[in-house]
Amino acid sequence: MNFSEQATRSTQSSLDMKLYHHCDVTLVISALFLLAVGLVMVASSSVEIADRATGDPLYYFKRQAIFAVLGVLAALLLTKIRLAYWENSGIALLFLMITLLVLVLVPGVGRTAYGSTRWLALGPLGIQVSEVVKLLLVLYLAGYMVKHGRQIVESFTGIVKPMLVLIVLLTLLLLEPDFGAAIVLLAITLGMFCLAGAKIWNFIFLLFASAVSMAAVAVSSPYRLERLTAFLNPWSDPFGSGFQLTQSLIAIGSGSWTGLGLGASVQKLFYLPKAHNDFVFAVIAEELGLVGVTMILLLFMVLVYRCFAIGRWVEKKGMKFGAQVCYGIGIWIGLQAFINIGVNMGVLPTKGLTLPLVSAGGSSLLVVCMAIGLVTRVYIEGIADRTSNLQEFSEE
């Protein structure tokens, strides 16, 4: 056996081992760590709230655990579905997005909570439609960019068509209203256009037009304007419009370097609203301190980095659809984590967005797990393609 044959067999063995694992280990481990931290912190931050509301101190933890199991199972299922299926389902995905957003606005079908109608009632459970739409939009845009990539690069028309679709989606979201989800969808779209090679001037025009439109929508609504002004100086009205943010800042400041200890948060004792949901990061900072906060930030950085790294890797192999899916999911998770943490720290106005994989919220947890499953499927097909290419080389 010559050196070339030995090298080929060694490489084949290495690739077979990677294919056996069926996943990017770093991606999966970072996601599972965030999921585990989320379960622990939901339990810690919701004990008193759950006990008073339901009589069961672990009610929210049990609910989150059920969705975590469902999310992992859904992720495993998506790793078995070929990407070609999603790539060829653009019209169906578009129809499903619009249908879901319309259904949630139908009286008796959509469920209203906290002044917004964002949930579809499915028996005892409720599915937040905007979370599902985020994933569907990534798949739809990825397919569009593969089919119309040249138009996106060469002409403004290639960008206008999906932007018209986005306008419809954003309009329906603002009717709920769900301003935070609308911003995330807009950012995902612009980010994917940029990575698809849209001309810089076209991109700048879209960015400017989007920023002006979102700003106009924000200032046109009294409650949104109140949120915008409240975060600038929450201490001016600490028991009114600035109450939630001031309590969050107190929690973060109390944590210092190592925190008060797991379960020792004071602000979660009915001081900080939504302590287990939108503001769980503040409880993490209070109980685990700067050490815990740094750990969370590093895990998100690794998770987002792996999404982009896998996307770039498969793009070099010609898997344009898989690459765009990875980019879109990376933008989505990274941006939503950034916004949630920014809101908790008072550098961004309140948006009502969860911290992916960490905050209590069944819909968000389920859909983000599915997104991780899709990125894993991209990785699997990339490995399989690499293995098949090596086999062809060996036969030659």
Image (cartoon, helix red, strand yellow):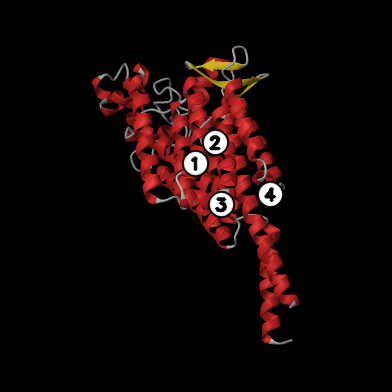
Q: CA distance from mark 3 to mark 4?
A: 22 Å
- CA gap, disc 3 to disc 1? 15 Å
Name the amino acid, label 1. Answer: Trp
Considering every residue shown, the one lying at the far bottom of the view is: 2
Asked if labels 1 and 3 touch by Cβ distance under 8 angstroms, the answer is: no
Q: Which is nearer the N-term, disc 1 or disc 4?
A: 4
Residue under numbered circle 4? 84
The answer to whether mark 3 and mark 4 are in CB contact below 8 A is: no
Q: Is residue 192 above or below residue 318?
A: above
Q: Which residue is mark 3?
A: 27
Distance (Cα) linking label 1 and label 2? 8 Å
Name, please, the residue furthest toward the top. Answer: 108
User: Is there CB contact under 8 Å for labels 4 and 2?
Assistant: no
Q: Circle 1 sits on which residue?
A: 332
In the visual, does 322 lie left or right of 331? right
Residue 280 image-quadrant placement: top left
- Identified by mark 2, the residue type is Lys
